[in-house]
Image (cartoon, helix red, strand yellow):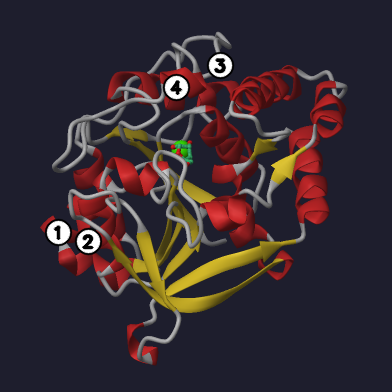
Amino acid sequence: MSKVIFDCDPGLDDAIALLLLCQSEYEILGVTTVAGNHRIEVTTKNALDLLSFYGRADIPVAKGAERPLIQPLTIADFVHGPNGLGEVILPEADRKPEAVHAVEWMKNTLMASTEKITLIAIGPLTNIGLLLSMYPEVKEQIKEISIMGGSTSFGNISPVAEANVGHDPEAAQIVFSSGVPIRMSGLNLTFQMFIQDREIEEIEALSTDVAKAAAKFLWYHAAFAKRMGLEVDQMHDTCAVVSLMEPEAFTGRMAKVTVDTGWGPGRGQTIADFRALEEERNVFIYESVERDRIIDLVQSAIARA
Ligand code: RIB
Ligand code: CA
């Protein structure tokens, strides 16, 4: 069974992505948290509470970076709610995070493994950027990094910057230029991976505690999208998980990706070069998804939870 480490900033769409991963064939070695959607104390509490709620309190949680490498932290509580989970109150986990920082925990776990590990990163890339900078020897232990981040089209926190990359462009540049194989689920893809109201209603009708909570996460996230003039909820973080579970439902191309780390209007943009030298193209950029097929996968995974 393939091993993964899940780096996240829960976060409503993070919560759905974690639920799907818990229902997958992957062996989850641990969950690491980063500030982004909310402050590190909140994203870490949410990770602990979500894992307990999903029946996976066996999975260790390690608390990571409390702010981006260079620019100050700006949280997205206007999207994810004051508690980061759409005001859904989960039972409090009765355990604490690991004693070491997420970067140390990832280094120790990667270097102790007898097989390569897949990283899934669905928040700002601060932890991963620190990891690769402080301990480059871990690169040999990483099979690939599946990230929700960037975009080859429009941005969301600026006309060109997607939130995870835009929150910490320097960390993202370290990751994209590391030479480690990356699978990038950017906004150009995730806006195709929307869930319709009736499909959320179908999840709600499953009537289990997990399904009802998942539906609340989705409704709250959808409400923000609708306030922004969109019709439906985009399942951003889900893409970084289901593209590993069901790769044949996706298409894409290899590219070299450079992050604009300047301080002008392009800051945080991911610039894809599909014509770079083959050896420089380390990023598989997803470009399309069979949405209906993935909705079926999501609904059946939630039904199993
Ligand atoms: O741009 C969307 C990303 O930013 C998602 O990961 C969401 O959870 C937020 O972190
Ligand atoms: Ca996220």
Inspect the image, locate mark 3, and give the three-letter code of the amino acid beneath it. Answer: Gly
Task: State yes or no: Cβ of the residue under disc 4 lies below 8 Å from any atom of ligand 2.
Answer: no
Q: Are marks 3 and 4 in contact (CB under 8 Å)?
A: no
| The label number, if any, that marks residue 86 in the structure image | 3
Inspect the image, locate mark 2, and give the three-letter code of the amino acid beneath it. Answer: Ile
Identify the element where label 3 is drawn: loop
Q: Earlier in the sequence, mark 2 or mark 3?
A: 3
Q: Nearer the viewer, residue 55 or 143?
A: 143
Q: Earlier in the sequence, mark 2 or mark 1?
A: 1
Task: State yes or no: Cβ of the residue under disc 1 lies below 8 Å from any atom of ligand 1.
Answer: no
Q: Earlier in the sequence, mark 2 or mark 4?
A: 4
Inspect the image, locate mark 4, and give the three-letter code of the amino acid beneath it. Answer: Asn
Measured from the top left, where is residue 213 in percent x and y? 68, 19
| The label number, if any, that marks residue 174 in the structure image | 2
Measured from the top left, where is residue 65 in percent x and y? 22, 36
Q: Is residue 129 left or right of residue 52?
A: left
Can residue 125 be seen here? The reply is yes
Instruction: Tell me the quarter of the picture where residue 242 sits.
Output: bottom right
